[in-house]
Amino acid sequence: MEFMFNDSIIQLVRGDITKLEVDAVVNAANTSLMGGGGVDGAIHKGGGKAILDDCIKIRNQRGGCAVGEAVVTTGGNLKCQYVIHTVGPVWNGGKNNEEEKLRNCYKNSLIQADLHSVSSLAFPNISTGIFKYPKESACSVALDEVSQYLLRNQTKIKKVIFVCFDDESLEIYKNEIKRLG
């Protein structure tokens, strides 16, 4: 499923983000950048030692990655040149500026993509797993922030893929796109 925003395409797919051939994949990381469960664990496992080595360098330079920020490493053994690591917020009932922090994840990832001349990138559903952000709200934030970035910026990004791990998430994204369209 594809939709146009200015000169860029937003695509929805169900699948494994580690198998995509894009310039960059976004990792739903933790602040330590040392890998973890879910998407983070799969990206570290699939990308191999090169990603971990870059993450260690970043940790040594700046102490990790704060919630809402984004840092870039090699893609290692993945079919991408870069991994953009961003740390989503843990859901706390909306009382801890979670929406703003999640928006920053998408915005800062897109900024990093442009800084590295990325023309295609893939996002997972940030914070909706073990961080428990409500899927519908997270989807709304993701699509709004990405579409606004594509509309408002002179960007090198020509394709953004939202990779949904399950059918439920894919349906949520499809419904939100229809609502926006």
Image (tube, rainbow, N blue to C red):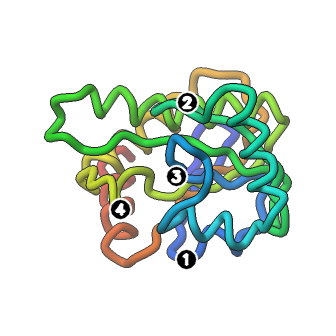
Check disc 3 and report its element: helix, strand or loop: strand
Q: Residue at x 58, y 21 (%)?
A: 152
Judging by the rendered image, the residue that carries numbered circle 3 is 28
Q: Residue at x 74, y 44 (%)?
A: 56
Which one is in front, 172 or 129?
A: 129
Question: CA gap, disc 1 to disc 3?
Answer: 16 Å
* Chain-order first, disc 2 or disc 4: 2
**Image vertical order of residue 168 relative to residue 111, above or below:** below
Judging by the rendered image, the residue that carries numbered circle 4 is 129
Q: Residue at x 72, y 51 (%)?
A: 83
Whether residue 150 can be seen here: no
Check disc 2 and report its element: helix, strand or loop: loop
* Chain-order first, disc 1 or disc 4: 1
Query: Looking at the image, do the residues carrying marks 2 and 4 touch, with CB atoms under 8 Å apart?
Result: no
Question: CA gap, disc 1 to disc 4?
Answer: 15 Å
* Chain-order first, disc 3 or disc 2: 3
- Left or right: 41, with 154 as reference point: left
Judging by the rendered image, the residue that carries numbered circle 1 is 15
**Residue 120 placement (x, y as % from top left):** 74, 51
Between tags 1 and 4, which lies in front?
4
Counting other residues with Cα less than 10 Å from the Cα at mark 4, is it few (<14), some (14-19), or many (20 or more)? some
Q: Residue at x 81, y 63 (%)?
A: 49
Q: Amino acid at mark 1?
A: Gly
**Image vertical order of residue 105 relative to residue 78, above or below:** above
Q: Amino acid at mark 2?
A: Glu
Residue 82 image label: none
Q: Amino acid at mark 3?
A: Ala
* Chain-order first, disc 3 or disc 4: 3
Residue 69 image label: 2
Check disc 4 and report its element: helix, strand or loop: loop
**Residue 33 placement (x, y as % from top left):** 61, 47
